[in-house]
Image (cartoon, rainbow, N blue to C red):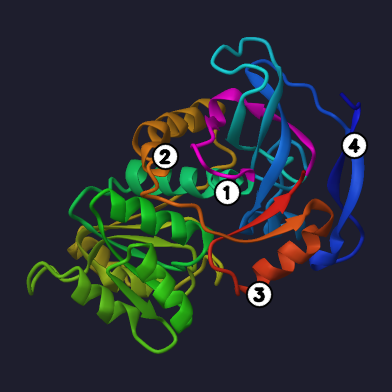
Amino acid sequence: MSQTMKCIELSGETGADALVLGERPVPEPGPGEVLLKIKAAGVNRPDILQRDGLYPAPPGHSDILGLEAAGDVVALGDGVQDLKVGDQVTALLNGSGYSEYAAVDAGACLSIPGGLSMAEAASLPETFFTVWSNLFDRAHLTEGESLLVHGGTSGIGVAAIQIASRLGVRVIATAGNPEKRQACMDLGAERAVNYKEEDFVEAAREFGSKNESAKGVDVILDMVGGDYIARNIKSLAPDGRLVNIAYLQGSKAEVNFMAVMLKRLTLTGSTLRARDAAFKAEIARNLKETVWPLLEDGSIKPVVHATFPLAEAARAHKLMESSQHIGKIVLDVG
């Protein structure tokens, strides 16, 4: 095996043009880790934030971009028992997805569902781990409840709509044009709102209404923030839960908390990257038990909008920043 690997480095440029192909030593797996020879890696919004200096890697982790990848296990660290050299896995990473090799926590690895390509498999972990942790572990979303997903055709949105709807949740989503609205419906949403033409607050209150005194949806998954925060509170039913996982329009807002008290709402949020290996391994176990069978039988399908060679990571970032994609963008590491 080579002692060096190709990877994406940050140059002195700004924006997507900062991404250039470089070379570094191949890492060695530590205790509880495996060395993954990466075949494909997912591109996610946090990568853009890290690129621009707004989301640094946690202490002790690689500064190379990339939070998910799929490939072959080529070496084992001490104490690894459930994986072997030659296994093909998809994995949630702490970094280094934009490279040919990465040292990965063994507990964050999952077998690749039958029939999926490496690109499809690489598109799963970051969004599926995030959706499961926030909707089902944190917000306690259950069968028969209603869910509003903002950004329904984003990677997160595609995962949330499919997982929730297949587990018996009624889903309404927001999208920015007719094509994306239809895509949300095709993925399993019962209702999709073009937020540029329709007030999602009224749509959500009507969609989730149980009676005149309990209008609104049970759970909202939001990545927008800003003025959406107050509007989300209006959209929730009594005992509703608002989960924020990003703030694309800012994390500061003026909010009247009287509705939070009167409707007994829960406002929460989380980030995943800084959580420890045991936390992520528990999510992996839940996904393997509940969601992976739905991938195996085709009930849930990865949605990959485009793939780019590793050396063209800048083009992948520009596409993501344009918001013209539906689903995931993937790098072919080869």
Count of marks overlaid on the render: 4
Q: Mark 3 is on which residue type?
A: Ser
From the image, tell me which residue sits under label 2. 296
Mark closer to the chain start, 1 or 2: 1
Mark 4 and mark 2: Cα distance apart in space: 36 Å
Residue 234 placed where, x, y %? 28, 73
Q: Position of residue 288 (x, y in %)?
A: 42, 32
The magenta segment: 99-118
**What kind of residue is marked 1?**
Glu
Looking at numbered disc 4 in the image, what kind of residue is underneath it?
Arg
Q: Secondary structure at mark 2?
A: helix
Q: Is residue 95 left or right of residue 120?
A: right
Q: Give the CA separation, mark 1 to mark 2.
A: 13 Å
What whole-number distance in Å separates the C-alpha atoms at marks 3 and 1? 22 Å
Local secondary structure at mark 3: helix
Q: Which residue is drawn at the image coordinates 76% and 60% (left, top)?
A: 52
- The reply, left or right, for residue 163 in relation to residue 123 is left
Q: CA distance from mark 1 to mark 4?
A: 26 Å
Q: State the residue at coordinates (52%, 58%).
A: 303
Characterize the local packing of mark 3: few (<14), some (14-19) or many (20 or more) Cα atoms within 10 angstroms.
few
On whether residue 219 falls in the magenta region, the answer is no
Residue at left offset 49%, top offset 57%: 156
Task: Confirm whether residue 255 shows in the render.
Answer: no
Q: Which mark is residue 322?
A: 3
Q: Secondary structure at mark 4?
A: strand
The quarter holding residue 145 reads: bottom left
The residue that mark 1 highlights is: 120
Q: Could you say which is closer to the camera, residue 301 or residue 225? A: 301
Near mark 1 (Cα within 10 A), the count class, few <14, some 14-19 or many ≥20, is: many
